[in-house]
Image (cartoon, rainbow, N blue to C red):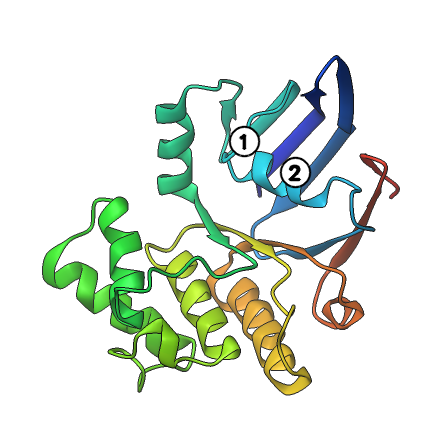
Amino acid sequence: MTVLQANDIHKEFSEGEDVVSVLNGVSLALAQGEIVSLEGPSGSGKTTLLSILGCIMTATSGEVVVEDEEINTDDPRVLQEARKRSIGFVFQQYNLIPALSAVENVEYALNIKGVRGAEAREEAERVMTEVGLGHKFHAPPRDLSGGQKQRVAIARALAGRSPILLVDEPTANLDSQTAEQILELFRSLARSENRAILVVTHDPKVRNVVDRVLTIRDGRLCN
């Protein structure tokens, strides 16, 4: 079943008197249990497309459909509700809160979704254990390696069992062994939990774990 769809997405930005087209009619669909990579050179529109699919940014024209709901508004409340309900986002730079422990970073994401108290702590500990960090619950981000920070970011995206996972450059700045472990984790999550996962990447190793490879150049999908 398709859980995320983009139909004829265009995105333009104004730079002074000029208008720059970043996306030019992009359409794609992502199904449950499927892991797909999105490749392309810098400036091709990958991150912009990911932000639109993740309801962080709105398109100039076109339509995003999240779990059969059309998201064709720039109303921040509608976008936030779509993210809370359906989308987990793994940012390239982790975006962890320095003052919180690893498990508290995950718990905070659940609080935003409306899950609080003992239920939030139990779920945060569950996903932390799932990504192999059951021994790092109380570690602050400054005491974690790059791979461990990435796993906390993944755990935060998984918390609340969002059916869609959007991932921005997950293997950047990781050693090869840790990168392979992260990629295997994504493949396992797609298969065992029936999640739809879209990975933006420059890393050719990602091809080893995905079902499909999409390529974007000059704001257009090439396949």
Is residue 172 shown above or below 120? below
Of the numbered discs 1 and 2, the one sitting upstream in the chain is 2
In the rendered structure, the answer to whether residue 209 lies left or right of residue 152 reads right
- Neighbour class for label 1 at 10 Å: few (<14), some, many (≥20)? some
Residue 48, numbered circle:
2
Kind of residue at disc 2? Thr
Residue farthest along the top direction in this orientation:
17
- Neighbour class for label 2 at 10 Å: few (<14), some, many (≥20)? some
Query: Residue 42 at x, y = what percent?
Result: 79, 49
Residue at 48% x, 61% y: name it: 94
**Residue closest to the eye, 11 or 134:** 11
Query: Residue 73 at x, y = what percent?
Result: 49, 18
Image quadrant in which the N terminus is located: top right
Whether tag 1 and tag 2 are in contact, CB under 8 A, the answer is yes
Image quadrant in which the C terminus is located: top right
Query: Residue 190 at x, y = what percent?
Result: 55, 63
Q: SS for tag 2? A: helix
Residue 57, numbered circle:
1
- The quadrant where residue 16 appears: top right
**Residue closest to the eye, 137 or 17:** 17
Q: What is the tally of numbered marks visible in this picture?
A: 2
Kind of residue at disc 1? Met
Work out how far the residue at label 1 is from the one at label 2, CA to CA, in angstroms.
8 Å
